[in-house]
């Protein structure tokens, strides 16, 4: 009996060890895992890009894993912590320092030094976010500038000319007021002039604060500047549009239109990036885009990018680099342009029909021209917690439940604590 | 009991061997994670770099971090309304449905339905009910000539989510109480009727004392659920950027860990939640000895 027991235990142990032991060196193709966030339409295009890449690089196979935005980051962190990260994965530029500073990304500088032409022809501002004193630990794959989307049907019905380049925030407020209507006369507004989400800085408030001559953070990322006199002018403007003019629905009202009154056909204008183009194409009304308005200190928009990084723990850095290069090549960028969610980072493709003449016919050039006055969306360690403190902190104001000025001061104090903790 | 089957000699080996998978799972899965959480609560950890010793700093944070204190106060307020609400209402429903009414099983199914429906789906329906301008509830209010209410704005959201959570939990409470009620011998009621006791007297003199074990059990379960409540609350009160108008402790734990890379702080919050629930359980068991009647 005891002998049999020992036998049994040894057999089990042998099986377990065999399963955990080092795999035999692969004689077949090198397998890369690429992970990203996205929806099914994006997955289809990425499968195509991967197929093109595999055709051009026999001997490398790429498995694409896609998750939705929220679960993507949870999954990614778990895999990184477990020591089994995907070889290549997508990154949102503002979150890049959180990973780069923790040493889980591969330094791409040696590869770039060997092949500097890879960066040639990319829009320089899109590279800025990934630059560190030790070099690049990631590269952008596509970018987003924020522009004004407007509902042509609503403008036409009101006989108001479309927004023209050179218009100002005062014009925006005035036009929004004129486009706000109670169409069925029941005392409740059912067409608003403007809506933008105020939680994150990217959609409207960083642009406006820059246009008014203010800034978001001090250059050393130690202080939050969104309560400067210039920034206060911006907050006051928004507050008045929402609660005095009623031309901009508060957040609770916007939530009833699925959080996007413009898409719901209940707001005449909004500010957002190219990622909404495929969705808005099915909105059932005519729309186009115009550049951001000017403020007293000039015109500004925000540029942000999604990029790719390579895990430091990858077993196949050379192959992963090859894939990154392919994404940035004209072939890869053209496929991305077809997807229609973002702007290609490669200038030659962005300015080609692949991007400008995509199936959704609007003035796509506005997104590229906006780069002339664009500023990089701030990228710093602790970004997520900082933006939660600011976004959550100001949310009661935009829901009409808190005073603007005291809330702003309290939020800035707490935001500075987050910056201090992330030094 | 003493004369039950006892494993003899060699059988003991098999006993332990066969129990091993469950025990290992329990030790590593449950106790292991409790231990790990306790350990992590004394560290600073961002998941990607090695943890560093933080001592009691994360626990000090629990008393000074305003965002956490706000979520703790929300959880406490929520539980204070939710637990009595669930116990009283589900007992009420169970008493109503413990009589021979036509279609009783249909009613019971209706009340139990929320328990087996996806919380996300029901929360979306409740969003339609609570909407400010387009919601069903405000439509009814304005029809009655009343002013519409912003049900999910900060000042009302807590009460609105308590209602939804109680509504979602009545079904389970009802099952517990129905089981308790059917166990009460009919003779007691017959005897009381002969003595001339009316229905209300019967309820307070017979039903209520005899159902105290079920009340005890339901209060215990509801309390645990209250401190862990998350899904309905989040679905009804979420705003852009992953924020919630009624952040509760579980939400705070999740957000600190996965969004702010603050696993140490999140662990300390989890430990505090556990300690609070454990203390309440101790209190309940002490009360049980004094007030619960077992036949």
Image: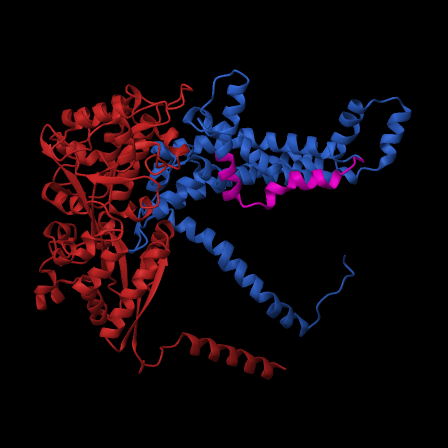
Chain colours: A red, B blue
Across and down, in percent, residue A292 comes to: 17, 36
Quadrant in which the C terminus of chain B appears: top right
Across and down, in percent, residue A24 comes to: 35, 81
Q: Is residue A136 left or right of residue B29?
A: left
Across and down, in percent, residue B162 comes to: 53, 31
For residue B114: magenta? yes
Picture quadrant of residue A207 = top left
Q: Residue at x 40, y 18 (%)?
A: A187
Q: Residue at x 63, y 72 (%)?
A: B13
For residue B283: magenta? no
- Give the camera-side residue of A405 and A126: A126
- Give the camera-side residue of A81 and B61: A81
Quadrant in which the N terminus of chain B appears: bottom right
Across and down, in percent, residue A9 comes to: 53, 78
Picture quadrant of residue A322 = bottom left
Q: Is residue B167 left or right of residue A368?
A: right
Q: Residue at x 42, y 50 (%)?
A: B37
Residue A79 in sight in this render: no
**Farthest right residue?**
B194
In this figure, what is the number of numbered marks? 0
Q: Is residue A115 left or right of residue B149?
A: left
Magenta residues? B100-127
Residue B228 in sight in this render: yes
Tell me: residue B91, above or below residue A336.
Answer: above
């Amino acid at each position: 009996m005891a002998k049999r027991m020992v036998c049994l235990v040894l057999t089990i142990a042998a099986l377990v060890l065999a399963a955990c032991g080092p795999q035999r060196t692969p004689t077949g193709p090198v397998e890369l895992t690429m992970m990203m966030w996205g929806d099914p339409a994006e997955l289809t295009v990425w499968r195509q890009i991967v197929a093109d890449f595999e055709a051009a690089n026999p001997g490398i196979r790429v498995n694409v894993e896609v998750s939705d935005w929220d679960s993507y980051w949870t999954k990614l962190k778990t895999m990184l912590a477990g020591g089994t990260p995907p070889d290549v994965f997508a990154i949102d530029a503002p979150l890049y320092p959180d990973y780069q500073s923790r040493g889980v990304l591969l330094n791409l500088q040696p590869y770039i030094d060997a092949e500097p032409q890879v960066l040639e022809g990319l829009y320089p501002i899109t590279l800025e976010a990934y630059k560190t004193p030790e070099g690049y630990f990631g590269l952008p794959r596509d970018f987003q500038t924020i522009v004004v989307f407007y509902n042509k049907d609503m403008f036409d019905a009101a006989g108001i000319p479309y927004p023209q380049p050179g218009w100002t925030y005062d014009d925006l407020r005035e036009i929004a007021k004129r486009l706000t209507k109670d169409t069925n006369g029941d005392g409740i507004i059912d067409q608003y002039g403007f809506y933008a989400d105020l939680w994150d800085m990217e959609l409207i408030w960083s642009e406006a604060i820059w246009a008014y001559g203010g800034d978001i953070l001090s250059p050393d990322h130690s202080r939050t500047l969104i309560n400067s006199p210039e920034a206060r002018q911006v907050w006051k403007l928004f507050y008045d549009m929402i609660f005095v003019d009623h031309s901009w629905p508060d957040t609770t009202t916007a939530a009833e239109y699925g959080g996007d009154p413009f898409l719901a056909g209940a707001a005449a204008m909004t500010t957002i990036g190219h990622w909404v183009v495929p969705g808005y194409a099915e909105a059932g009304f005519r729309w186009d885009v115009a550049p951001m308005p000017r403020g007293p200190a000039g015109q500004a928009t925000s540029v942000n990018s999604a990029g790719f990084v390579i895990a430091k723990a990858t077993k196949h850095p050379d192959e992963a680099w090859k894939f990154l290069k392919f994404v940035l090549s004209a072939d890869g960028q053209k496929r991305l342009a077809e997807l229609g969610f973002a702007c290609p980072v490669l200038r030659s493709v962005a300015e080609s029909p692949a991007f400008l003449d995509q199936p959704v016919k609007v003035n796509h050039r506005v997104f590229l021209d906006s780069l002339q006055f664009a500023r990089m969306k701030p990228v710093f360690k602790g970004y997520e917690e900082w933006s939660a403190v600011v976004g959550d902190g100001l949310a009661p104001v935009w829901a009409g439940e808190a005073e603007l000025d005291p809330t702003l001061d309290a939020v800035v104090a707490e935001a500075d604590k987050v910056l201090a903790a992330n030094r | 009991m003493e004369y039950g089957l006892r494993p003899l000699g060699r059988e003991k080996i098999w006993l332990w061997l066969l129990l091993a998978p469950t025990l290992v799972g329990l030790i590593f899965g449950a106790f292991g994670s409790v231990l790990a959480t306790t350990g992590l609560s004394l560290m600073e950890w961002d998941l990607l770099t090695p943890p560093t010793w933080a001592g009691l700093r994360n626990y000090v944070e629990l008393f000074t971090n305003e965002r956490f204190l706000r979520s703790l106060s929300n959880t406490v307020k929520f539980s204070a309304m939710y637990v009595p609400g669930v116990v009283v209402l589900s007992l009420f429903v169970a008493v109503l449905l413990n009589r021979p009414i036509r279609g009783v099983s249909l009613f019971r199914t209706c009340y139990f339905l929320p328990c087996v429906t996806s919380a996300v789906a029901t929360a979306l329906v409740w969003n339609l009910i609570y909407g400010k301008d387009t919601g069903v509830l405000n439509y009814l209010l304005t029809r009655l000539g009343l002013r519409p209410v912003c049900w999910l704005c900060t000042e009302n959201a807590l009460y609105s989510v308590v209602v939804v959570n109680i509504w979602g939990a009545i079904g389970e409470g009802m099952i517990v109480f129905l089981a308790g009620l059917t166990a009460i011998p009919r003779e007691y009621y017959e005897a009381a009727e002969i003595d001339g006791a009316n229905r209300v007297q019967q309820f307070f003199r017979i039903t209520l004392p005899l159902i105290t074990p079920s009340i005890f059990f339901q209060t215990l379960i509801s309390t645990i659920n209250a401190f862990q409540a998350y899904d309905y609350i989040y679905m009804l009160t979420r705003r852009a950027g992953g924020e919630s108008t009624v952040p509760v402790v579980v939400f705070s734990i999740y957000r600190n860990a996965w969004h702010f890379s603050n696993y140490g702080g999140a662990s300390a919050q989890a430990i505090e939640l556990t300690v609070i629930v454990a203390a309440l359980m101790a209190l309940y068991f002490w009360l049980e000895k004094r007030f619960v009647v077992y036949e």
